[in-house]
Image (cartoon, rainbow, N blue to C red):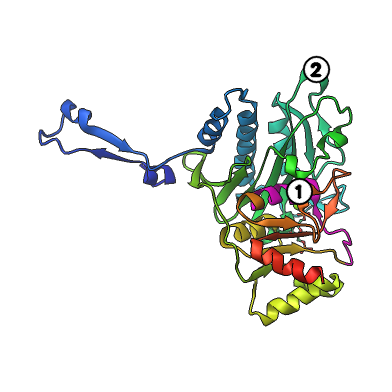
Amino acid sequence: MDGSLADQRMSTHNAPSGSGSGPSNAAHRHVVTDNLTSLQTFILEEEARFPNASGEFSWIVSAISLAAKMIAYKVRHVRLQGGVGQQGDVNVQGEEQIKMDVIANEVIMRVLGSRKSIAVLGSEEEEQPAILRRGSEGGKYCVLFDPLDGSSNLDTAVGVGTIFTILRNDPHIPDAVKTVCQPGRQQVAAGYVLYGSSTVFVITTGHGVHMFELDMSVGSFLLVSRDLKMPRAKKVYSVNEAYTEGFPEGYQRYLKWAHAQGYSSRYIGSMVADIHRTLVNGGVFLYPPTKKHPDGKLRLLYEANPMSFLVEQAGGVSVNGSVRTMDIEPKALHERTPLVMGSADEVEHVLRHVRG
Ligand code: AHM
Ligand code: MG
């Protein structure tokens, strides 16, 4: 026993036998497992609910969790590994790549690239989606991801994260971009990994939101919260308030109203960390149109949609300021969207002001 989470949740008891020690004691020995469930087991159990499931989906989640463990290790030793600082390249978003962006992208590409069930793999760091197995070779799913969201915060040791979404592949669509340009409501699964003070893996397959924590000593993500539900209301908003003057008037009105109502502000500037807090504690996260980003900054397919799926499954709401985020018909892999997501009542307060 080394004090790991697994140890604490699994205690072994020797029932008193009155006959002292020895082989006879073994008959009375029982194990209390307090619901100790790894991510792997959880996904297999979920899949078992569908008698025709091929198991391909659980292979993909298992690959994502392997990549996450590798990235978690690298993030924890980012300076020692030489991962801070800029790579010297600009990605397709026109943003300077941090070295760890490139490292995290390579890890995911390498780990997921070998999974037979993935037809198309798309990343924030790659201009075009990678076509792995199309047509007759099969490949039931497509995976899109942001390998290391919020990476500009790495040099100050702030939490960063990996965001992913799993979509169904349509082998009849020859074009990879068109294949992955699916509205968020069609997602098969989505989630994120937050590399924070602890490493958490949060996932939905459309049946609630489940949270796992990485137990380093056994190298597994273990279930810590099943069917997470976010509070309906919480007087907290999360927005880069320095951009207020560039927001459309409705958002400015909302902020004035929130100030008068005694709201608190929390903004990390790392979407995974901000959304994780919002999921757990409630509140509202906003990235409205700004002068610099008139269409919003966050990417629809691999940032907004997966987070929206999680937020809705936890009982919250996600909109782009007027329509449900997951109903937007995407046109491009790296398309951006304004975003308002969080506790149902809090999103409604924002929309009331935005609608005018
Ligand atoms: P990135 O994908 O290039 O890391 O950018 C996305 C990040 C989000 O994590 C965060 O919500 C947002 O950018 C912060 O933007 P800003 O610094 O404009 O507030
Ligand atoms: Mg990002």
Q: Quadrant of residue 121?
A: top right
Which part of the image, by quadrant, shows the N terminus? top left
Do the residues bearing badges 2 and 1 touch, measured as CB atoms within 8 Å? no
Residue placed at 66% from the left, 51% from the top?
312
Q: Nearer the viewer, residue 40 or 174?
A: 174
Q: CA distance from mark 2 to mark 1?
A: 30 Å
Does 88 appear in magenta? no
Determine the residue located farthest toward the left in the rendered image. 19
Q: Is residue 303 left or right of residue 96?
A: left
Mark 2: secondary structure = helix
Q: Residues within 10 Å of mark 2 (few under 14, many from 20)?
A: few
Which tag, 2 or 1, sits closer to the chain's start? 2
Q: Which mark is residue 326?
A: 1
| Residue 268 seen by the camera | no
Task: Find disc 2 in the rendering and name its residue.
Answer: 136
Mark 1: secondary structure = helix
Which part of the image, by quadrant, shows the C terminus? bottom right
Q: Nearer the viewer, residue 295 or 53?
A: 53
Q: Quadrant of residue 350?
A: bottom right
Residue 106 spot, x, y in % from top left: 74, 38
Residue 108 spot, x, y in % from top left: 70, 37
Q: Nearer the viewer, residue 311 or 33?
A: 311
Q: Is residue 337 above or below residue 245?
A: above
Q: Quadrant of residue 171?
A: top right
Q: Which mark is residue 351?
A: none
Magenta range: 291-311
Disc 2 marks which amino acid? Ser
**Residue at disc 1, CB closer than 8 Å to ligand 2:** no
